[in-house]
Structure formats: C-alpha cells, structure tokens
Image (cartoon, rainbow, N blue to C red):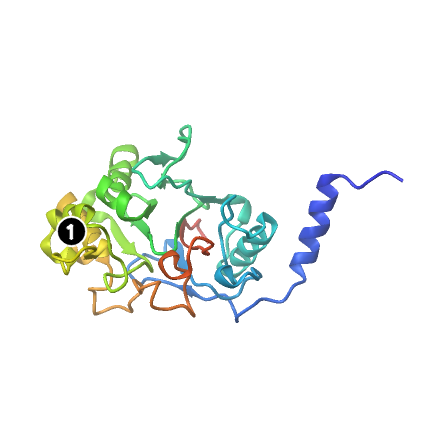
Amino acid sequence: MAAPSASHVRDEVAIFLKQLLALKGKIDILKSSLISDCFSHGFTTRTGGISYIPTLSSLNLFSSSRRRDPKAVVAENIRRLGLHAGFDPEKFHLVKTNHANDVWVMGKPAPESYDGIVTNQVGVVIAAPGADCMPLLFADPVAKVIGVAHAGYKGTLMGIAMATVNAMVTEFGSELTDIVAVIGPSVGPCCFSLVKESAEEFHNIHPDCVKARGSRKPYVDIRLATRILLQQGGLLPHHIQDNTVTDRPNLTLCTACHPESFFSHVRDGNNFGTQIGFLWIRGSD
C-alpha cells in the first residue's frame, strides 16, 4: 500500500484542526470608529484560537522557525479569524517584517522583506503583526487607499510610519489631510525601556517620549513618537487615534500589561505569540 502523499496528510491535519474547540474564549476584535465604513478592519486579541503552548495560546497568528507553533495551527487560526471578521484567508497578506522601512506597493514586485503594505485593491486583506511592536492602520476614505505597517522601536526611528503614508500619496494619489491612522495595541512606556543611546534618539523626536532619562535604561514611548512623526509629516492630529485620545475607546492598550488579552515579547520571552492589525477595502454591497 502506497504511503499517503504530503498534500493528503496536510489535508487530513487541516480537517482535524477545524474540529478542535477554541481555547480561552471567543475571538475578540477591537475596532476604531475613526476608520470609515467603506473599510473593514480590526485588531486581534489572543483569545479564540487553537494554539496550545502557553506563551502562544490561543489565537497566535504568526509562525516562524524561531517559534514553536506549527504552521498548520496558525493557518487554522487565520481561517477562523477570517470567518469571524468576514474575509477570505486566501486574500490575506501579512507584512514580512525586518524592523526597517521598506513598503510593498501591491501590484509591484514585493521586496524580500517589508514592514509596510499599501494598496487600492478591493477585497485584499493587508495586515501587520504586533507583540509589543505597533500594528499601524492607515485609511484614506476619499481616494479609497489603505496601508498597514509594523513598527517597533527600530522601524519607528527609521520612519516606517511616514514611509507607508508617503507610498499612499505617491503611488495612489492620497492627500495627507484625508488619511487617518490608528495605532494598535503595543507596549507602553510603562513597560518598555532602551539603552541610553537608543533612548536619546527618541528624546530627539520629543522630550516627552523618554521617561527617567538619566537612568541606565530609560523608558520610551514609541506610540507618542509615532504620533509626533505622523503630525510632522502632515497628518491632522485629530486623524490619529492612540492612547492620548479620550473621546473614543482606547485601542492602544499596553500589550505587556494585559496578559489575558495580548501577547507580549517583553513579558513572555522569545517564544511569544503575535496579534495583528488588519484592513481591507469593502466592495459595493
């Protein structure tokens, strides 16, 4: 009797995983009222998936050689997220992070790695990961253009946020004053510190970005730095949602401070899970 093919085994595994019960409750998606209804979007939390390793449990959405969550499990988590959020997992594109400032303009050849994606294609889901790093969502309801970016402290200093915005402007004709930006769950200055040299670079953006500047490892506010850089780049202050906004529900929660809701590299160590911010342009209903 011939041994089953690899594709047959994968299919059998996928069927088995579909039957598993979700862990730690149901899928919960955070949404911003700043993003127009002509788009669909959200920020995931850690509940409602099938990842079973404690630091990856349960809706981990990223697999790599350095983390122990099987790719088949992550694929099932993405499938369940798609069912819940209303998108086709076959149209799902996650940035290939390198903690830099490259942006993939969909429709053009993709760089080997990129921390931002922009598109004007309807129905294509673009997503940015985060587990302390910021998932950033950008939407232009006038030109119908979207962008996402992954921004840790290195990408923030390298300008990934404005690189993504500028790609929307130059490639698809967006106006800076039409673009809205939402900073998703990410590590706060309460929990994130850097060596003095790196902290000084954030102090140069604005003194308020650094706490306990005289200490060996000052605390750094990468969210505030992102807001300041976006405003300096031309986005309107009221078109940016972060933890400083008080007239909307706070989505920019500290990932390290909320272990029941979010994964965190700072808190959980190297085998950490990943949540995402995702966005797509809705078609005509």
8, above or below 60, in the image: above
User: Is residue 34 rendered to the left or right of residue 204?
Assistant: right
Residue closest to the eye, 82 or 272: 272
User: In percent of the image, x 19 and y 57: which residue is there?
Assistant: 218
Image quadrant in which you'd find residue 255 = bottom left
Q: Secondary structure at mark 1?
A: helix
85, above or below 65, in the image: below
Q: Quadrant of the N terminus?
A: top right
- Please state the horizontal and vertical placement of residue 281, each as a whole percent of the image: 40, 48
User: In percent of the image, x 32 and y 58: which residue is there?
Assistant: 186
- Please state the horizontal and vertical placement of residue 124, each as a whole percent of the image: 45, 44
29, above or below 168, in the image: below
Image quadrant in which you'd find residue 23 = bottom right
Count neighbours of disc 1 (C-alpha within 10 A) and say few if under 14, some if 14 to 19, many if 20 or more.
some
Q: Amino acid at mark 1?
A: Ile
- Please state the horizontal and vertical placement of residue 168, each as a whole percent of the image: 28, 39
**Residue 140 in view of the camera:** no
User: In percent of the image, x 29 and y 62: which residue is there?
Assistant: 252
- Please state the horizontal and vertical placement of residue 270, each as a whole percent of the image: 43, 53
**Residue 77 in view of the camera:** yes
User: Is residue 100 rendered to the left or right of residue 246?
Assistant: right
Circle 1 sits on which residue? 228
Spot the residue most to the right: 1
